[in-house]
Amino acid sequence: MRRTAIAAAMTLAMTAIVMPRLIGTVAPSAEAQSPPPPAPGVPVTAGIVATADVPVFLNAIGTVQAFNMVTIKSRVDGQIVKIAFAEGQDVKAGSPLIQIDPRPFQAALDQAMATKQKDEAQLVSAQADLTRWGELLATGAKSRQTYDQQKALVQQLQASIKADEAQIENARLNLGFADIRAPIDGRLGMRLVDAGNMVRATDAAGLVTISQLKPIFVSFTVPQENLHKIHEKQAGGDLTVHAFGSDNKTQLAEGRLTVIDNAIDQPTGTIRLKAAFANTDERLWPGEFVNVRLILSVRKGAPTVPAQTVQDGPTGQYAYVIKEDNTVERRPVEVAAVQDGLAVISKGLSPGDRVVVEGQYRLTNGARVKLEAKPAGAAG
């Protein structure tokens, strides 16, 4: 009995020792074996590589010039008796502007006509005498000398009449100059004289200016190294020129290149160009500075992304492309041009690729991203 009790006690002791070990080796549950949830992605704003027809152009700063500009001056001396225009008025060629007192010029015309009439009457009498003395010369009643003198008098009076006709024409011109009219279509500027003032043909200052605004010119310069490109493209037709406001975003007008100067300005190494604009809405004004774009060609269907998509790295420019599993690939790209907030991609991206537009500063190659809504007004 004693041996049996001892054996039972030893069995219980061994069971107490083994049970904790068996409990510690129980297989983990299926829930404990599942992988941890993936880390949240880096929040970014995405965009799509789009295609667009992108112009290739030269930038310049231009000055708007009137197509024609005339300073109206008096061609005769006299007193202004009437001003027939309002400042800033649009006028047509031939519209009356200023009237100078015409009475002195009318009197000079009348006097010249009277002088002609007097000389014509004398010529009639002299010619009659010349005819009679020619008949008497044949009979010997008049000498050859007397006849020649009378003939010279007739010729002198004929010359006087021609001079009278010139005086009449001059008087008519002066009378016409007293009525000053617009020489071209255009817009008048500020009046520089008032009625009652005396003016002279030798005065340096004008009476008013008139500028032709439709059409209008824009003059600008580009570096001389672009001249061969302009000639090459111009051979295929007229080149388009766009005029923009000071913000370089608001397009004011579209015109065409009309003039290439005949020489390069050596001190600056630039060539002067001139473009003509219809200016029907008068958005261009003489003396205004504008930003000019001379369109050389158009890239058809070029891949484009918002300019901030492209980043600069130690090995060149790159962009992050978003793959199907929302991880990113850092891809090197080549940019042909950046204009109007868009980067034109020549290599590295294809139309339809998803790219990171904003949020690149926290990304590395292969990182997971979380797409956020594009902010209002964002490109791409």
Image (cartoon, helix red, strand yellow):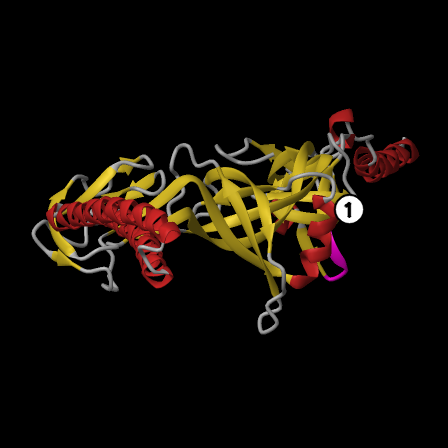
- Is residue 39 shown to the viewer in this render? no
Depth check, front residue: 5 or 276: 276
Residue that appears at 26% across and 64% down: 204
Residue 282 is drawn in which quadrant?
top left
Q: Secondary structure at mark 1?
A: strand
The span shown in magenta is 314-318
Which amino acid type corresponds to the residue marked 1 in the rendered image?
Answer: Arg
> Percent x, y for residue 199?
16, 58
> Percent x, y for residue 41?
65, 38
Position of 191 compared to 292: left or right?
left
> Percent x, y for residue 301?
73, 32
Depth check, front residue: 261 or 99: 99
Depth check, front residue: 367 or 258: 258
370 in the magenta segment: no
Question: Considering the image in quadrants, where does the C terminus appear?
Answer: top right
Residue that appears at 14% across and 55% down: 78
Position of 103 compared to 339: left or right?
left
Question: Considering the image in quadrants, where does the N terminus appear?
Answer: top right
Residue that appears at 72% across and 49% down: 335
Mark 1 nearby-residue class (10 Å; few <14, some 14–19, many ≥20): some
- Is residue 181 shown to the viewer in this render? yes
> Percent x, y for residue 254?
52, 37
Depth check, front residue: 49 or 143: 143
Residue 74 is drawn in which quadrant?
bottom left
Tell me the chief SS of the magenta region: strand
